[in-house]
Image: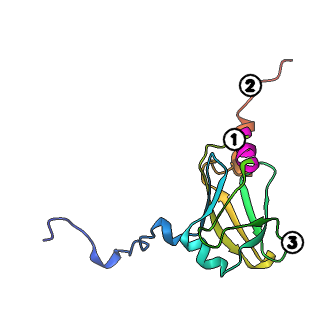
Amino acid sequence: MDEFEVNFDTLQDIPPLRRNDEIPQVRISASGRVALNKAMTERMEGRWDVCVRTSPDYRFLVFLMDETPNIHFSEKSAYVTHRELAGLLQAEEIELPAVYIMKWNEAHRAWVGRCQELPEPPSVEQLVRSSKGRGGRKAR
């Protein structure tokens, strides 16, 4: 009898451990330093001039690779200083440094990152459920 009672036939592999330097990221500091990590730099494949845009709430940062560039990253250190962007993030109460995990979107030929400092927005189902629970009974 197995003292742990583990069914070894049902064991599953855990996902491989990924270090942060293997995940493409963009970090924006309070001083306005917009820095690409090593993984993002490698995926940019020598492109230092990029069109960078954000969603209105700054939740998403997008590098549009086929659009007219508006940012030039340093080739040596893979960063650019953009104090105005840092100020806009702070005005929206986004805690700095803000970290955007970047993923490639082939349909738009863009790197799209979601800010890790912001919680995931609620799903429509959650919003509908929470609105049903509010208000109480109507007066007659």
Quadrant for the C terminus in the image: top right
The residue type indicated by label 2 comes to: Gly
Counting residues from the start of the chain, the first of labels 2 and 3 encountered is: 3
The residue type indicated by label 1 comes to: Gln
Q: What's the residue at 66%, 77% (across, down)?
A: 44
Give the magenta-colored segment's residue range: 84-91
Task: Find residue 131 and report its horizontal and vertical position in percent.
Answer: 75, 37
- The tag on residue 68 is 3
Task: From this view, report whether residue 21 is shown above or below residue 125.
Answer: below
Mark 2 neighbour density, 10 Å: few (under 14) some (14–19) many (20 or more): few
Mark 3 neighbour density, 10 Å: few (under 14) some (14–19) many (20 or more): few
Q: Which secondary structure is most common in the magenta stretch? A: helix
Snapshot quadrant of residue 19? bottom left
Task: Find residue 16 and report its horizontal and vertical position in percent.
Answer: 42, 74
- Give the label, 1 or 2, closer to the camera: 1
Task: From this view, report whether residue 38 is shown above or below residue 129.
Answer: below
* Alpha carbon separation for disc pair 1 and 2: 38 Å
* Alpha carbon separation for disc pair 1 and 3: 27 Å
Q: Label 2, on which residue?
A: 136
Q: What's the residue at 71%, 66% (across, down)?
A: 112
The residue type indicated by label 3 comes to: Thr
* Alpha carbon separation for disc pair 2 and 3: 53 Å
Q: Label 1, on which residue?
A: 90
Quadrant for the N terminus in the image: bottom left
Asked whether the beta carbons under mark 1 and mark 2 sit within 8 Å of each other, the answer is no
- Give the label, 2 or 3, closer to the camera: 3
Q: Which of 134 and 138 is in front in this view?
A: 134
